[in-house]
Image (cartoon, rainbow, N blue to C red):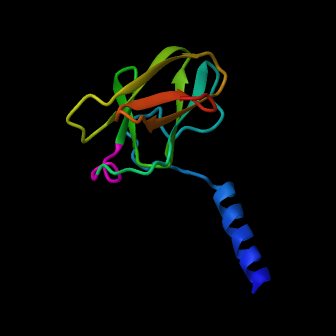
Amino acid sequence: MKKTLVALAALLLAGCASNPYEPTLQVKSSFANASAVAPAGQTHIRVHRLEQSSIVPFEKTCPLMVFLDGQTVASLHFNQYVDLNVPNGMRTIEVRIACALTKTTGSITVDANGKNISLVTDRSFFGTYNIRPEGSSK
């Protein structure tokens, strides 16, 4: 019994570690769902909406809209990401919950210079959305 329990726990952990999140299927731009290697003159940007517990009723079903330089490129549900290949230069990425009645946006300006950029987004304690480089603190 103990061996079976340990084997199941190891299998569960291995499954979670191998695919911690999934790509979104809701894309609205030719920049989205790009290959992991950007063509010359472009930068690969990944935006990942972190999984969060929520007491807000609509938040589990309402998508987080992703904007690149003011244009909608994708929408994300919890634990989804979108890959973008964008022309090099200064780029503004904004996220906004689609169903909110108040301003809940977050934005970041990045220097798309040919090096891969990985961003994460989540909701703060105050209900606004943060977007920041992966691995940086809130």
Q: Nearer the viewer, residue 88 or 46?
A: 46
Q: Where is residue 68 in the image (x, y as percent from the top left)?
A: 41, 25
| Nearest the eye: 99 or 112 | 99
94 falls in the magenta region? no
| Residue range of the region highlighted in magenta in the rendering | 57-63
Position in image of residue 115 (x %, y %): 67, 22
Quadrant position of residue 76: top left
Q: In this view, does 101 lie above or below 12?
A: above
Q: Looking at this rendering, what residue extends furthest in the bottom direction?
A: 1
**Vertical position of residue 122 compared to residue 77: above or below:** above
Which residue: 63% across, 37% down? Answer: 36
Q: Which residue is drawn at 34% across and 45% down?
A: 63
Number of marks: 0
Q: Where is residue 123 in the image (x, y as percent from the top left)?
A: 41, 37
Residue furthest left in the image: 101
Residue 60 drawn in magenta: yes
The x, y position of residue 111, in whole percent, is 57, 14
**On the picture, is 30 further left or further right than 37?**
left
Could you tell whether 117 is left or right of 100 in the image? right
Residue at far right of view: 3
Q: Main secondary structure of the magenta part?
A: loop
State which quarter of the image contains the N terminus: bottom right
Residue sitting at x 28%, y 53%:
57
As displayed, is residue 34 above or below residue 5? Answer: above
Residue drawn at x 39%, y 26% as measured from the top left: 106
